Image (spheres, helix red, strand yellow):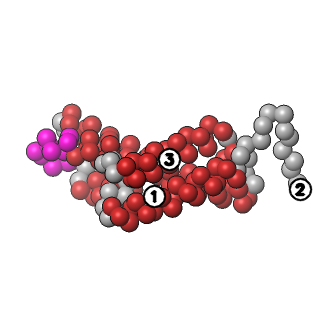
Amino acid sequence: MSADELFADLLMLAHAVYSLFVLLGLMLILIGMILGWRWNRNRYFRILHLAATVFLMARVWIGLACPFSAAENVLRSRISVPCPLGGAFHDVLHYCAFRATKPGYFAGCATLFGILALAAFALSRAPRENQQIVETT
C-alpha cells in the first residue's frame, strides 16, 4: 500500500466520519430535545455540530468542491494498483460521505438540513451557569 493510497483512504474515512457526525449529530439533538436528554445540550458539542453544518451549507451555496473529495481525488489519481481492502470498502465509505449524490439534490438537502440544525441550536440552548435545570419525575 502506497503512501498516497493510505492518505486517500484516511481522507475517505475522515469524510465519512464528518458526514455522519453532521447527520447523526442533528438526529441525536432532535431526539434529545424530545426525550429531555441533558448530554446533548453540551455547549461544545452543539457549537462543533453547528459549525460543521454551517461550513457544509456555505460550501454548497458558494459552489466550492468538497475539500475531502478534491484531495482524495488527487491522491487516487496517483495510484496505479487496486486497493487491497477492495472496492466494497470504498463504496461503503463513499456512500456514508454522500459522494454519489447529485449536486442539485445535495444542495437542497444541505440547505434544509442547515435550517433544521440552526433551529435546533436555537431551541436547545444549554442553560446558563446560574440557571438550574428543573427535572420532573
Mark 2 vs 3: CB contact within 8 A: no
Q: Residue 8's image quarter?
A: top left
- Disc 1 on helix, strand or loop? helix
Of the two numbered discs 2 and 3 in the rendering, the one whose residue sits closer to the viewer: 3
Q: Which residue is mark 3?
A: 54
- Disc 3 on helix, strand or loop? helix
Where does the N terminus fall, quadrant-wise?
top left
Where in the figure is residue 73, as x and y percent of width and height?
Answer: 22, 46
**Residue 61 shown left or right of residue 136 in the figure:** left
**Residue 95 shown left or right of residue 7 in the figure:** right
- Residue 118 in magenta? no
Which tag, 2 or 3, sits closer to the chain's start?
3
Q: Residues within 10 Å of mark 2 (few under 14, many from 20)?
A: few
* Mark identifier at residue 110: 1
Question: Relative to residue 59, is residue 91 depicted above or below?
Answer: below
Which region shows up in magenta? 74-84
Real-space CA distance between mark 1 and mark 2, rounded to the nearest whole angstrom: 38 Å
Q: Which residue is mark 2?
A: 137
Which tag, 1 or 2, sits closer to the chain's start?
1
Question: Relative to residue 135, is residue 103 depicted above or below?
Answer: below
Q: Amino acid at mark 2?
A: Thr
Q: Residue at x 33, y 44 (%)?
A: 68
User: Closest to the observer: 91 or 97?
Assistant: 97
User: Closest to the observer: 7 or 102?
Assistant: 102
Q: Main secondary structure of the magenta part?
A: loop
Q: Amino acid at mark 3?
A: Val
Real-space CA distance between mark 3 and mark 1, rounded to the nearest whole angstrom: 9 Å
